[in-house]
Amino acid sequence: MKKLLFISSLSLSFIINSPCKKKDNNAENETKKDTTPPVITLKGQSDFVFIFGYPMQDPGAIAMDETYGDLSGNISSTWNSEVDVNNAAVQTVVYTVSDKSGNKATASRKVTVKLMPYNLHGEYNTTITQSGQTYTANITTLSDGDNPFQISISPFFGPVSTLKSDLSGETGNLLTVDQSASGVTAKGGGEILENAKKIVLTYTISTSCSSYPCIQTMTKK
């Protein structure tokens, strides 16, 4: 009887004094750590084209996070610092947001500010450079052409008195010179500079027996 009581006491002592296996909270936290960034969805198109000179507002974006929900109010945008509607250029707006776990998401929008013919209307002081010599020419007037994307330049110092050219290029800042009359041709191109304040036409005038380069520079009055 005493022997049995002794064994039982030893068993109870072992159970009481044995260390309990603790739950590893750190390992569980590592397993549940949030590593998924939010998702930003742009409102409207990801590629906008605006007309030069017309103010526009940021269409904005929304941000959703699988852990923290709607984070749209935390989005930062570079619209105000990057978009200038008085600058004919391709511009990029970046949207950024982070959740409370530090996961960061970004999205971008392409904004193109494009020139139209009516942005060029008016009178321009003009110089002509031919065969290396430059002289002041008559005032040049720019007005509408025959279609919504065409500009009329008069006088044009080539085989015709008026050059009509469609605006081209991603920002509408390029012109084409391709005119002929009475056996004389003018071929080349042009560029609209300084946000519609300056236009430079560079072309070659050719006849049946000769050709020479010509540069017509127009600066808005």
Image (cartoon, rainbow, N blue to C red):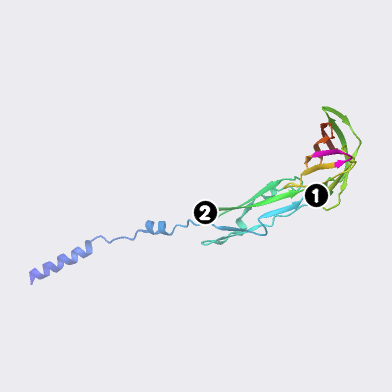
Pointer 1 residue: 116
Report the residue at 87% width, 35% height from top: 126
**Is residue 113 a member of the stretch shown in magenta?**
no
Residue drawn at the location 8% of the way across and 70% of the way down: 2
* Image position of 172 (left or right of 102): right
Instruction: Specify the farthest residue to the right.
Output: 138
Residue 182 forms part of the magenta stretch: yes
Q: Mark 2 or mark 1, which has the lower sequence index?
A: 2
Q: Is residue 63 above or below residue 166?
A: below
Mark 2 belongs to which amino acid? Answer: Asn
Q: Which residue is mark 2?
A: 103
Q: Quick check: can you spot residue 186?
A: yes
Figure disc tally:
2
Q: Secondary structure at mark 1?
A: loop
Residue 36 x/y as whole percent = 50, 57
Magenta stretch in the rendered image: 180-187
3 shown above or below 141? below
